[in-house]
Amino acid sequence: SPALNPAMAHMRSHLAALTALTALGCILAALAAVAHGQWNPPDPEWDEGLPLATLPPFPCQPYEVPVNDEPATNVNELRAHDIKVLMAMGDSMTAAFAATSPHFLRSPVIPREDRYLSGLIGAGSMRYALGSLFQAVNPKVQGGATGATLPLDGLSVEGHHLPITLTQNARLNAAISGAVVQDLPDEVDYLVEQLTTAYNETVDFQNDWKLLTILIGANNMCGACKNSTRDEPDTYGEVLDSVIEDLYKRIPRLRVQLLPMFNVSQVYPWAHTNSYCKTMWRTIDSSACACMTPFHSTREDLAAINKAAVGYRSQVHKIAQKWQAKNLTDFTVVVQPFTTGLHLVNRKLTSEFDCFHPSAIAHAWIGAALWNSMWTPPAQKASNVTFVKGLDFKCPDRHTILQ
């Protein structure tokens, strides 16, 4: 095979070193925890908190579209059958990192990005995820993630994340584990490249309507206590708006829906009342959220996270209002606000692996809530997820417009 160019050889060398160091660190931390008797077996009381309602079977079916149906020509008049492509951008939450992973040292040992069940774009069979739900009504829609990927994209070399592995599984889920809002331009590049190569024969890039969902800010929020301008709400808004501008220029016929970032600090009390989670946060996962997971985190650090969350949510609404005011016919930005007041009422909503990321159950609820929000008029949209009360699915017909 051809010799590696110096840049590629340098990157692979860095990756090998990072992987080896990460593995060694995990092993040493685990051994230390076991030696000190801190690593308890899986908690039989993981189902702790308010009882979660059961999601009902998804009742929606494909509807008949007349042969003479006129395709939508305005982004504000799109119906389910007008959407040809689903896409998503974000961080490890959108990538569904560790959603199904068990406690550390249990098989599979390496946590995966369970993109196929990501609430924002998963398209695995029998899943309450947007890709699956959308396909039940519009079987022709493309882009939903169908498999798992390895979290190697969480590693970076010279300021850039490594490419997403197994793109045939990720499809148009461009989320990068560890991403901050400043990493979104790389995700835009990924989507454009996929649409114009892997999808060039099945998607009319210029004319097909596309729906993109974005949830970003958890990792910026986790740095809010460091007083860096990178993580200030104004900076978050400026960068996100510039990304929206780039999307407008590079991807034709696009509807963008922004999800306000919920308070990630909610996981703190759950983690600190469970011996397994405390051990994880003190060892292997101490760097997951710089302002929260380290043992020395303070009340002031958590307050900084919460303040940033409020600021980010405000910026999301300002950006959507700005772009809606342009009254464009081929591009718009809307907010699906159900994540604003998302409240983790049960430990089962967090990953059993790291006590931080959303679990498969949480993703199912997020997917269901997103689906309903998309068909609800703005004034009636929910600002939370009804984990306890449950929900009834909304089923669109050929006249129902995306909201």
Image (spheres, grey):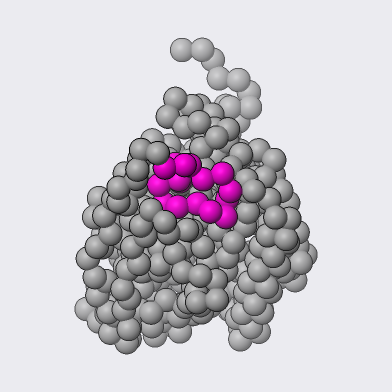
Residue at image coords 35%, 79%? 387
Residue 7 in sight from this viewpoint = yes
Q: Residue furthest front?
A: 68
Residue at image coords 73%, 60%? 325
Residue 100 screen position, x and y as percent: 31, 60
Residue 340 painted magenta = no
User: Which quadrant of the structure image shows residue 180?
Assistant: bottom right
| Left or right: 62 as drawn, with respect to 305 | left
Residue at image coords 71%, 48%? 245
Residue 346 screen position, x and y as percent: 35, 81
Residue 353 screen position, x and y as percent: 35, 65
Residue 335 screen position, x and y as percent: 58, 65
User: Which quadrant of the structure image shows residue 156?
Assistant: top right
Q: Residue furthest top?
A: 2
Residue at image coords 47%, 58%? 401
Magenta residues, start to end = 69-84
Residue 383 drawn above or below residue 286: below
Residue 115 in sight from this viewpoint = no
Instruction: Please name whichever residue, 31 or 101, is drawn nearer the observer in this view of the structure.
Output: 101
Instruction: Please name whichever residue, 228 or 88, is drawn nearer the observer in this view of the structure.
Output: 88
